[in-house]
Amino acid sequence: MNAPDTARRPLVGISTYSTQAAWGVWRQQAALLPSTYVEAVTRAGALAVLLPPQPAGALEAVAALDALVVSGGPDVDPARYGEPAHPRTDPPDVLRDAWEFDLLHAALTRDLPVLGVCRGMQVLNAALGGTLEQHLPDRLTGRVHRDPPGRFARTRVNVRPGSRLAGIVGESAEVSCYHHQAVARLGAGLVATAWSTDETVEAVELPGRRFVLGVQWHPENDTEDIRLFRALTEAGARGSGRRGADRREVRGAAADRGPVGHTEPADPAGKIEPAGRTERVDPAGPAETTRRVDPAEPAERTEPAGTAEPAGRTRHAESAGRAGRQPADPAGSHPTAPHRDRADRRKADR
């Protein structure tokens, strides 16, 4: 059998850590990524391209890609979504935050397929004006979403029927989690499409795009299940003809773009907005929250969430019901919410 024509494989970029590492006799700052990401991408039929944090070049990097994976890692700087840091939030990694926000901005501008993994989903949410719950144990008195250091927790998630994610993994899945933060207010245009049993948002999607999906778990750790990476690769392959044109277009634009390291923290109202699909949300103004409804009901209903809280307020002890809050979608692109009210859910669980 002939070897595959690697020149035709989609190029999938994966953001990486920049951290101290040791190998052989050396201990140095290194561009680092668990090899499970590379294995998942290559098994899905693509070529993996590592994208370590650097002070410039995100636009040029994205122009060469067919798809982007924003990988897991430390917490996003709360300044990116206008809140003070919780005592348990990681120290900020300014360079990595700036690099990944710029990668994501360039990818969304070009409608490049994107998969956000754990931190990557949180980067997606914050970049679109959303906020994060900074320490889940402040709210969850029982189960948390990570085991002792270095061990993934197995978590059952329920997926919104009819969503892109449901088309990939089905309406229920057991996944590998390791996180102490989660989505609080959804970014502009995002739709929550999976939840754990404690109501924590476990996946988000951006409707109307070729493929923009974030998951709070680590699909690269499930080495026998590459469905998410295959779906990303297939979406990238369908647009691979754009790559050459993108590279030519970016040659002039890159010269006008400032260094990534000087990128300002994201405005809580959202600097990256899907053009023509949503309105920016004023965190100080009235908000709407989508209420889960019975699958038999004909359409999604919304109800006022009361007085919106200022963007600078932390959410450490807020109830799970605030997770999954999302802005109104004037374009009507959000799919119908198929889930039951919480009271019905509790009855069903009993």
Image (cartoon, grey):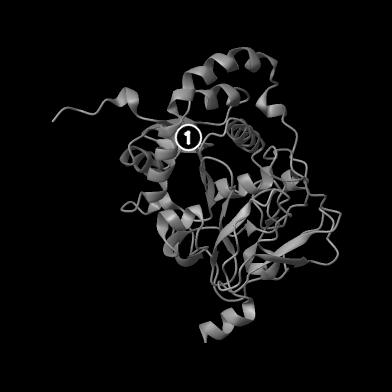
- Work out whether residue 238 can be spotted: yes
Left or right placement of residue 316 versus residue 103 in this view: right
Residue 152 seen in this snapshot: no
Quadrant assignment, res 37: top left
Q: Identify the residue shown where x is 71% and y is 45%.
A: 278
Q: Where is residue 23? Give x, y as percent.
A: 39, 35
Helix, strand or loop status at disc 1:
strand
How packed is label 1: few (under 14 Cα within 10 Å), some, or many (20 or more)? many
Q: Residue 226, image x and y in percent?
A: 36, 49
Q: Position of residue 195 (x, y in %)?
A: 55, 65
Nearer-the-camera pick, 91 or 145: 145
Which image quadrant is residue 97 in?
Answer: top right
Q: Tell me the residue that label 1 is attached to.
A: 67
Image: 267 above or below 55: below
Vertical side of 144 occupied by 227: above or below: above
Q: Is residue 130 left or right of residue 283?
A: left
Name the amino acid, label 1. Answer: Ala
In the displayed structure, would residue 313 be above or below residue 76?
Answer: below
